Image (cartoon, rainbow, N blue to C red):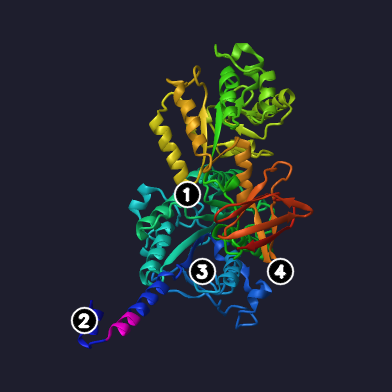
Amino acid sequence: MYFFKWAHTNKMNKKNSLFIIFCLFFVFLVSAQKKNTHVFITAGQSNTDGRVSNKLLPEYIKKLAIDTVYFKDGAYKYCKISQNRNDGHFIPYFPKGRISEGFWTYDAVTYYLLEQVLQENFYVVKYVVGGTSIQYPNDTAKGRYWSANTEWLEKTVSFEKKGKSLLLSFTDAIDAAIDSTLSKLEGGYQIDAFLWHQGESDDRYAGKYYDNLKAVIAYVRNHLTEKTGKDYSKLPFVFGSIPESNRHYKPEIDAAMKRIANEDPNAYLIDMSAQELQKDRTHFNEKSAEYLGKKVYKTLDKILILNGSGFRVARYKDDKACAISFTFDDGLAEHYSLVAPAMEKLGFRGTFWVNGRTIADTTYQRGFARMTWSQMKKMADKGHEISSHGWAHRNVTKLSPEELHHELEHNDTVIFQNTGVFPRTFCYPGNAKNNETIAFAEKNRIGTRTLQFSVGGKSTRENLDRRLADLLGNKGWGVTMTHGITYGYDHFSDAGIFWEYLKKVKTLEDRIWVGTFREVAAYVKEQKAVTCDVAKTDKGFSVVPRLALDKNLFTEPLTAVIGRKGIKKVAVRQGKKKLKVRILQDKALFDFDPFGGKIDVEVINK
């Protein structure tokens, strides 16, 4: 309004007025197109703080030091950090421990690699304290805890305020950074990921680690959402496991970490099980710190698509928005006579969990007709998954190690002998499980069913529709659980509800991948674990996929996406094999073997 009054008062001619308006509009467009500044939050204990001498920094980081004797002083060009501060002040980053200068860990490598790609300022809010636990109380910790226990948090305050909560210290530090610095950045900011390494100090409370860490992740995501008004419920969580040589290593904590990564579509676990430690058998040496730093960067590259080529690995097959697996418990006869044929008509395949003893001995069938082995062989031949629900449907959390071994391994053998396909997944009878049994059950398997939603007696058309809407919105993997359709435990009051549900999913097939539990579990684990080295070439770019999983177990092809508009033609070869490419309006898709070596991509734009 002021501009127009000024123009009128000074009797500007129409042409000059239009020119100035155009300039102002241009400035508005340029400012509107400014990208959000990248922000990362990092937390944990000593292996996130740093216990490796700066004298052992990689040579490419040493070049940034101004102290060429101890390499304690220097500065990264673009990375700004607020470390263990509650004033929101950022300084140029250089590797430094919380208390003492001259120590580094994995994130020094991650930030360096981010600099090389971003070539612009980015910010890190970091809060770390060595020797600290999530579990409160914990008599082996230092009196400071990451616990997200609501009742305890209401009774304490942050460590800086003379309390015992590190989680409140962390969120206070984030809030101060937002208020003092990040909210004032031109173009705004976006918190891209939450980096974490911790768990060694929870070894005496390993059975609680799954719930505790899951609660911390949820607390941070919810806090950021409330603080910023943005939806951070899907904030990527990137973390590393604990090396098996660590004196605090516990299989239950390892299983808890894997379970979180399996269940949370936005949690990415980096396998550190075989990595080296210092003589104290607790802290990373320079090799493992650099290894984790590179892996964290590669994971961020995958999540944020930093390589500049538009290449990414689709979260689900064919770049579908989400996935669903239909699973059926207890091997009821109608699974063969009703369910499998109905699914096949729609082009779907299901997963059928069976107890071998129930099939072999009618005295254990409790009056419910069961499938025969010959029927299950026919189903397996058609692509359905016949897998293990335990030999005798026993609660695996109450079995001795010998009994647990028999319950799983004997059933696997019997299924293989009768269907010709060895089961590589497992469903817990009665859904009873704990970290210890999960760790045992997942050995040499693709996955086990730890999360599911029930469809059956209590299902209505309305709540199943809501489930589908939530699944699409969350971009997750839904695993259904039902027993009987027309009879048996929790069968439908109206079987038509289930048949209509299947047909509804079919109408959404362009957005939902329907796969067996084995197929989706394998794909999701491969997609999360694979990293790709992308390099420009004269005709396009090359991709070298790297995957450390067992290639004899994980055999699902992955879908690659080239996110570009106006693609006219794409030619892709992996080794000597020419790969089929599907060109859509704004992307091109092709499937590749994550163990198959280098991929050459030639792109021709319109």
| Labels 3, 4: front one | 4
Q: Distance between the residues labelled 3 and 1?
A: 22 Å
Residue at image mark 1? 135
According to the image, label 3 marks what residue? 98
| Residue at x 39% of width, y 57% of height | 230
Residue bearing the label numbered 4: 538
Sequence-wise, the earlier of marks 3 and 4 is 3
* Secondary structure type for disc 1: loop
Name the N-terminal-most of marks 3 and 1. 3
Using the rendered image of the protein, determine whether residue 68 is visible from the camera's viewpoint.
yes
Q: Is the magenta stretch mostly helix, strand or loop?
A: helix
Image quarter where the C terminus lies is bottom right
- Of helix, strand and loop, which one carries label 2? helix
Q: Which amino acid does label 3 sit on?
A: Arg
Displayed quadrant of residue 187: bottom left
Vertically, is 85 above or below 359? below
Q: Which of 564 and 532 is in front in this view?
A: 564
Q: Is residue 14 magenta?
A: yes
Relative to 347, residue 60 above or below: below
Seen at 65% across and 65% down, the residue is 290
Q: Which amino acid does label 2 sit on?
A: Lys
Residue type pointed to by label 1: Gln
Which SS class for mark 3? loop
Magenta stretch bounds: 13-20
Mark nearer the viewer, 3 or 2: 2
- CB within 8 Å, label 3 to label 1: no
| Residue 439 in sight | no
The residue tagged with tag 4: helix, strand or loop? loop
Residue 140 vs residue 196, the one in the foreground: 196
